Amino acid sequence: MNLHTLKPAKGATHKEKRIGRGEASGKGGTSTKGNKGGQSRAGYKSKKAFEGGQMPIQRRIPKRGFKNINRVEYKAINLGKIDHYAEKYGITEFSLQNLYINGLIGQNDLVKILANGEITGKYTFKVNAVSEKAKAAIEAAGGTVEIVK
């Protein structure tokens, strides 16, 4: 084998398509762009979501509602689950850090305690928000609630 005998594998190289070089090339005349119209002209650029003049889908479909940019999304934890979590994970203080360490919330989640269910143990809560009924139930069971920001 010599360097001057090396050549690419069969089918690895292709001849360049020479457009607009006369009728004999087979790609002369319209230069493979068809007849007339914007797409055959130089500098043609298709607009995003252009459907050939048909009414685009983003205008055909009706719009509904809106998204409130000021909405605060909380991860809700019901009182009915508190005793279960305390037993399963051995927690008496329900702080954001403890909940994150045990995989109950994400790192940036905000937590709100809701009053669905019963609570029997005496627990400490350090969370972002608590409903009025939940706060009353926690304090009635001997627990404490602290709101953190």
Image (spheres, helix red, strand yellow):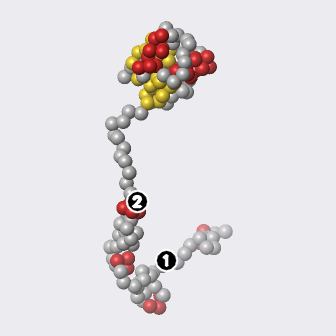
Q: Return the residue found at the far right.
A: 1
Give the residue at mark 2: 61
The secondary structure type at the circle numbered 2 is loop
Mark closer to the observer (2, 1): 2
Task: From this view, report whether residue 106 is shown above or below residue 130.
Answer: below
Q: Which mark is residue 134?
A: none
Q: Residues within 10 Å of mark 1 (few under 14, many from 20)?
A: few
Amino acid on which disc 2 is placed: Ile
Pick the residue in front: 101 or 84.
Answer: 84
Say which label, 2 or 1, has the lower sequence index.
Answer: 1
In the displayed structure, does residue 114 sit left or right of residue 53? right
State the quadrant of the C terminus. Answer: top left
The secondary structure type at the circle numbered 1 is loop
Q: Which mark is residue 16?
A: 1
Task: From this view, report whether residue 112 is shown above or below residue 8.
Answer: above
Q: Quadrant of residue 126?
A: top left
Pick the residue in front: 109 or 44.
Answer: 109
Q: Return the residue found at the far bottom.
A: 24
State the quadrant of the N terminus. Answer: bottom right
Amino acid on which disc 1 is placed: Glu
Q: At 55% across and 27% down in the image, what residue appears?
A: 103
What is the CA distance from the residue labelled 2 to the residue labelled 1? 45 Å
In the displayed structure, does residue 131 sit left or right of residue 8? left
Contact (CB < 8 A) between labels 2 and 1? no
